[in-house]
Image (spheres, rainbow, N blue to C red):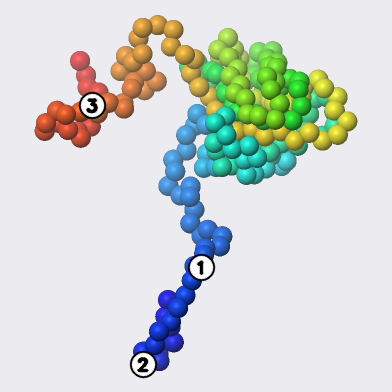
Amino acid sequence: ILFDPETAGTGLYYFDNLAQGESTVDACAGIEVNADIVDDFECQRNANYTCCGDIVMPVNNPDVSMGNPSDKVGEFVDPPGGFNALVIEDTAPIDLSLKNIFSMKAWAPVAGQILFKLEGGTAANVEVFMDIPATNEWADYNVDLSAHADGGFTKVVLFFGAGTDNTENNTYYMDDLRWNRAPFVSSCVSSFDDDDFTLLGWRYFANGAFEGDAFMVVDN
């Protein structure tokens, strides 16, 4: 801040209430793409919406809570009708060999069901209906698709309020769409043989000269 630039002399100035308007800093600059995250409506916008995606809008979270503390979420306005699709399509078959749990958070204004559907594969389409457990609050949905890893599917299709012939628009919110692996069912948590079975978050603690050194995976 220059007061009276190119003017000789001194003076006493007062100023107050410095504020910033629209940010000119990209909060997502330098963030690497995480292929496991389909869409978090913030920095990981990796979904390719090929049907009705023009009405999926990132908006402020209408219900910031323990159920979902995110600032931004996706808004989907479900028009009248029983089966209005939201299609997310990949250019290649979705790899369901390990990370085959489709997870998301959803906020529903009315009771009913959400239909999760796999399409575009070499096998028959897969449909999984899940009940909406509560309305006007965030709920977690985890859809186990492990039995369909060989189907070659390229599309995940969502139907909010599936089968309910609503007569007016219903506004749903969603967040953190991603692919997860199933919970461990054996005693082996990490084998260090490949990336999917390797835990790298180890750190030396109170080990003298080793303090702060990176953990290494080496050949046996």
| Residue neighbourhood size for the residue with mark 2, other residues' Cα within 10 Å, grouped as few (<14), some (14–19), many (≥20) | few
Quadrant into which the C terminus falls? top left
Upstream in the sequence, badge 1 or badge 2? 2
Kindly state the secondary structure of the residue where label 1 is placed.
Answer: loop
| Label 1 vs label 2, nearer the camera | 1
Please give the name of the residue rendered at 36% of the width and 22% of the height, measured from the top-left corner: 195
| Label 2 vs label 3, nearer the camera | 2
Please give the name of the residue rendered at 68% of the width and 19% of the height, measured from the top-left corner: 133
Horizontal relation, residue 172 to residue 5: left or right:
right
**Residue labelled with disc 3:** 216
**Residue labelled with disc 2:** 9
Q: Position of residue 155 (x, y in %)?
A: 65, 25
Please give the name of the residue rendered at 23% of the width and 26% of the height, measured from the top-left corner: 216
| Residue neighbourhood size for the residue with mark 1, other residues' Cα within 10 Å, grouped as few (<14), some (14–19), many (≥20) | few
Residue that protrudes farthest toward the top in the picture: 186
The label number, if any, that marks residue 170 in the structure image:
none
Find the distance from the CA under tag 1 to the CA under tag 2.
26 Å
Visible in this render: residue 93? no
Visible in this render: residue 112? yes
Q: Position of residue 119 (x, y in %)?
A: 68, 21
Upstream in the sequence, badge 2 or badge 3? 2
The label number, if any, that marks residue 17 in the structure image:
1
Q: Say which amino acid is labelled 2.
A: Gly
The image quadrant of residue 3 is: bottom left
